[in-house]
Amino acid sequence: MNLDYLLFDIKRTLRNRRVLIFAVLMPLVLFLIFGASLKESDTEAGISAIAYVMVSMAMFGSMNATMSSGGVIATERDGGWNRTLRLTPLKPQAYVMTKVILSLLLAIPPMLVVFLAGMILGHVHLSAGQWISVALVSWLGALPFAGLGLVIGYVAKPDSVQPITGLTTMLIAAFGGLWLPVEQMPAVMKDVARLTPAYWTGLSSRSALSQSGLDMHALVVVLCWTVALGFIGLRRYRADTARA
């Protein structure tokens, strides 16, 4: 990883304040909408329903923020930035790693805002250990979507990357159980849900709320999704720069 390039990318991303504000406000509004009608005594899948919604919306916020990197990549490709990078010592692995780390940094603000709303407005009561586990697992659960953002950024054209990213995010969230608990879905949709990374990231994050602790199987599946999508993103970067 090249620290100078990472700092440059962070400064450039922070200039686009509209995207950052949207990434933070959207999951917060959804949490308030879905969680407003819930009582503290309501439960879902054996845990507090408001906490269930809080984690789901935090995951949606982190997923939405990390996948937004695809738009940046598509714009860089269109502007010839990749051709410029070929003249530098920056290696493909370093470029991809920089984009992944940037995506993870973008995932932090929407998650924190939703968690704070859950604590203050939703009266979610967790132990310090649970808060740390939920936050850490939810944050690292954004990794597969950072890889997916890379893939979309190298497949889609600049004028279509935003609609593709938005539609993909909504579909993955809906079929992955972030809008509606998988337990309430028809049997066919339950099978479809298990084919999405959102199902496993949500399952691993919410498992930190249960008495049984983290779901290690879900964490392994999330890792597999991360490796697979990261590998595809790296291959697409190499193929794109080879044509440049």
Image (cartoon, rainbow, N blue to C red):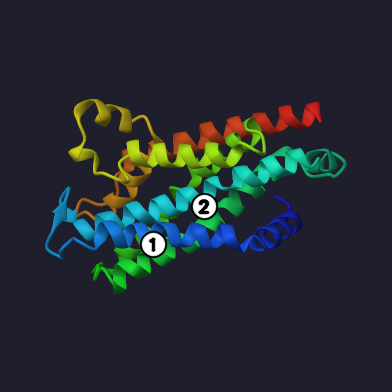
**Quadrant holding the C terminus:** top right
Q: Which mark is residue 28?
A: 1
The residue indicated by pointer 2 is 65
Q: Residue at x 65, y 38 (%)?
A: 159
Q: Quadrant of residue 243?
A: top right
In percent of the image, x 77 and y 32: which residue is there?
241
Q: Amino acid at mark 2?
A: Ala
**Residue 30 spot, x, y in % from top left:** 35, 57
Name which quarter of the figure residue 173 lies in. Answer: top left
Residue found 29% across the figure and 59% down from its top: 33
* Residue at x 58%, y 35% (from the top left corner): 152
Percent x, y of residue 7: 71, 60
Instruction: Decide: few, some or many residues near mark 2? Use Cα within 10 Å; few <14, some 14-19, many ≥20.
Output: many
User: Marks 1/2: CA distance?
Assistant: 13 Å
Q: Is residue 144 left or right of residue 203?
A: right
Residue 88: assigned label: none
Tag 1 near tag 2, CB within 8 Å: no
Spot occupied by residue 177 in the image (x, y as percentages of width and height): 30, 41
Instruction: Tell which residue pokes out farthest to the right in this image.
Output: 87
Residue 48 x/y as whole percent: 19, 58
Q: Is residue 146 above or below residue 135?
A: above
